[in-house]
Amino acid sequence: MNSTTQFEIFLRNAIAEDVADGDHSSLSTIPKDSSVNAIIISKDTGTVAGMQRASDTFHFIDPNIKIILHANDGQSVSPKDLLISLEGNARNILMMERIALNCMQRMSGIATQTKLLSSKISHTNCKILDTRKTSPGLRFLEKEAVLIGGGKNHRMGLYDMIMIKDNHIDFSGGIKNAIRKANEYIIERHLDLKIEIEVRNFIELEEVLAIGKVQRIMLDNFTPSNLKLALQKINKRFETEASGGISEENIVTYAETGVDYISIGALTHTVKNFDISLIASKND
């Protein structure tokens, strides 16, 4: 499913959730043909995201709304900065206000945090990855925000990579069986999928290195010193990813080990939403 189709489905669900049989506040108080001028402003400092998504949200309900974008996705903004100007039917703009702002606030919060972490390690070759720890139904927007903030997307879901974790290893009867079964599965079904495997210690790492037949190794909850030693053992034969216990305070130390990727679930599951507001005035 492409991003445009996903967004249309999202908007229909959002409207059904928020509007249902009508915005009765506006329907009861605002004349049908009333026009309004409105602006959307930043009330926070950081990286804005969701600009085009907000524009598409208003145009989804009313293509006649005039919209001017005063900032681009990925741009740094400050409090009181003008982001979007709107002019059009008052009922329609107010009906879609919260949906548009919710997208922008969530996406900008994620983009801001991603940009912060990415900038901290920009002197290295390491890249920030998101995870599947996303809000149900919003994954495509949250992962889009990670890209806007300068990060990279990990797998989008369970369907676009084989990621062998501890549960898979246990049910398969060990690392060797898990890797063998994953490769057989790809061949039997003629799939073009990468295989990543999680290791939790040096014993598991040595077993994976002896077997091979994976493309990436995730080193889970390794300390920076142990991670550096593990990378020496891997010796660039596989892509490498560090995960677990990595934060703003220690990310530079992890990135400077030479690991290829750092995955951080907090990019999407605990990020603070950006503060953005819409201000409307009646059009005489």
Image (cartoon, rainbow, N blue to C red):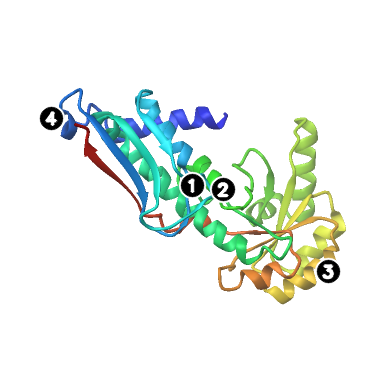
- Which secondary structure, mark 4? helix
Residue 280's spot in the image, x, y percent? 25, 41
Q: Which residue is mark 2?
A: 148
- Which secondary structure, mark 3? helix
Amino acid at the residue labelled 2: Ile
The numbered disc on residue 232 is: 3
Number of other residues with Cα within 10 Å of mark 1, as a class: few under 14, some 14 to 19, many 20 or more? many
Q: Pick out the residue farthest to the left.
A: 29
Number of other residues with Cα within 10 Å of mark 3, as a class: few under 14, some 14 to 19, many 20 or more? few
Asked whether 30 or 1 is in front, the reply is 30
Amino acid at the residue labelled 3: Gln
Asked whether 98 or 177 is in front, the reply is 98
Q: Marks 3 and 1, how far apart in space?
A: 38 Å
Please state if 117 lies on the left or on the right of 196 as rendered.
left
Give the mark, 4 or 2, whose residue is nearer the N terminus: 4
Give the residue displayed 68% in from the left and 43% down from the top.
Answer: 161
Q: Which residue is mark 4?
A: 28
